[in-house]
Image (spheres, helix red, strand yellow):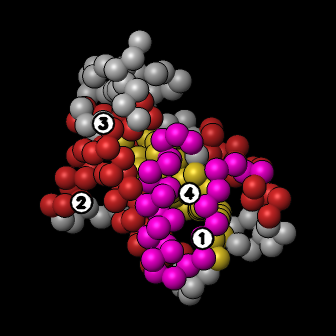
Amino acid sequence: MVKELEIDTTRLKKLVDQTLSASQVSGKSLRLAHYNLGIELSRLISQHELKEKSELNVLVKMRSGLCLGLGIADGLEHIGHIVHLVFEIDQILKMNHNKKIKTIIVDGVINTGNTILKDIRLLNGYDIIVATNVISKRSIDLFESNVVYATRISEHFYVGSNVKTIDNNKGPDTSERLFNNDFFN
């Protein structure tokens, strides 16, 4: 089930517009947009998932999940949760014998869903939710037994392509744009 962020202010609309592939926004501005949308998603997650203050794992999928994940972690800490920010699934498996600690898997973009589904399988038995800036509409059904919090749902879908140019309102790749690497090659 996907719970989409309600884009109800001019500020949020501007942040979402900056993250669109065709926006031509990259670098610091894009990183800040992802970070701020992470803070907004943390509020949504807290409203629906976290009825009381709790201990959480935030597993950030590198690279596109970094800024969004930091925003989510900072937002959740700000409202009183204890957050373990981790970048490798092994860190969670080693440090947590208590599988009741909720784990939020964060990725900037979910196209096929394969990366996240692999992590969900590895964390079998953990209380898991997923957070992303954008999820492809084609992948939603793969997560019917998990809750996914998304800034938006996209009609676009591309697999394994390192898109460097804008073509048909797609590209360049989000990870490349976040770190100003879309100018190379």
Q: Would residue 174 appear left or right of 104 to someone viewing this image? A: left
Location of mark 3 (residue): 26
Q: Earlier in the sequence, mark 1 or mark 3?
A: 3
The type of residue carrying mark 1 is: Val
Q: Residue furthest top?
A: 185
The type of residue carrying mark 2 is: Leu
The residues tagged by marks 1 and 4 sit, at their Cα atoms, a distance apart of: 15 Å
Q: Which of marks 1 and 4 is nearer the N terminus?
A: 1
Location of mark 2 (residue): 12
Q: Which residue is drawn at 44% across and 53% down?
A: 68
Callout 3 environment at 10 Å: few (<14), some (14 to 19), or many (20+)? many
Pinpoint residue 85: horizontal percent, then vertical percent.
Answer: 61, 61
Location of mark 1 (residue): 83
Location of mark 4 (residue): 130
Q: Which of marks 4 and 2 is nearer the N terminus?
A: 2
Q: Earlier in the sequence, mark 3 or mark 4?
A: 3
Callout 2 environment at 10 Å: few (<14), some (14 to 19), or many (20+)? some
Q: Would residue 44 appear left or right of 28 to someone viewing this image? A: right
Pointers 2 and 1 in contact (C-beta within 8 Å): no
Pinpoint residue 120: horizontal percent, then vertical percent.
Answer: 70, 52
Q: Which of marks 1 and 4 is in front?
A: 1
The residues tagged by marks 1 and 3 sit, at their Cα atoms, a distance apart of: 28 Å
- Residue 87 lies in the magenta stretch: yes
Magenta region, residue range: 62-90
Q: Is residue 51 placed above or below 71 in the rendered structure?
A: below
The residues tagged by marks 4 and 2 sit, at their Cα atoms, a distance apart of: 20 Å
Pinpoint residue 148: horizontal percent, then vertical percent.
Answer: 51, 58
Q: Which of marks 2 and 1 is nearer the N terminus?
A: 2
Callout 1 environment at 10 Å: few (<14), some (14 to 19), or many (20+)? some
Q: Nearer the viewer, residue 127 or 29?
A: 29
Q: Which residue is drawn at 72% across and 51% down?
A: 89
Q: Would residue 12 appear left or right of 158 to someone viewing this image? A: left
